[in-house]
Amino acid sequence: MKRIISNFFINLVVVLILIYLFNLGEAKSVLNIVLFSAIFTILGFTLRPILQIISLPITVLTFGIFLFLVNAFIVYIADIFTIGFNISGFLNNLIVSIVLFIVSFIVNKYRLKIKIEKINKTV
């Protein structure tokens, strides 16, 4: 549960920055971005693993690059389900998905490092 909540807040901050600072889309209010982040987080934990399994052969052939398209598709689906929020164009969807992936990867790597340090302290 902690992981879902932390991913939600990571997604929220990243999308806020991408929408308002880099102008990669439009949102009528911050509440729409919160809703988008919630939908994206839920889809990330439910739909992404299914799509990754289905696309495994092409992912292996492209050395993992196809996963960025899977993530862009999930961003697109979350965009469709969110009223008052729009990321215009496939390239912007791809940019948002790549930035979300990179930031999540860095945070999860840091989280794992802290967990390992806690385990080493108790041993």
Image (cartoon, rainbow, N blue to C red):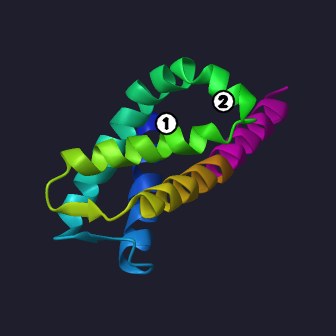
Q: Position of residue 20 (x, y in %)?
A: 36, 78
Q: Secondary structure at mark 2?
A: helix
- Quarter of the picture containing the N terminus is top left
**Quadrant of residue 63 in the image?**
top right
Q: Which residues are magenta?
A: 107-123
Q: Which mark sits nearer the N-terminus, 2 or 1?
A: 1
Q: Position of residue 120 (x, y in %)?
A: 84, 33
- Check contact, mark 2 vs mark 1: CB within 8 A: no
Amino acid at circle 1: Arg
**Quadrant of residue 116 in the image?**
top right
**Would residue 15 be found to the left or right of residue 95 on screen?**
left
The residue at 20%/60% (across/down) is 32
Q: Which residue is mark 2?
A: 59
Towards the viewer: 110 or 123:
110
What label sits on residue 60 in the rendered view? none
The residue at 33%/51% (across/down) is 37
Q: In front: mark 2 or mark 1? A: 2
Q: Counting other residues with Cα less than 10 Å from the Cα at mark 2, is it few (<14), some (14-19), or many (20 or more)? A: some
Q: Which residue is mark 1?
A: 3
Q: Secondary structure at mark 1?
A: helix
Towards the viewer: 117 or 24:
24
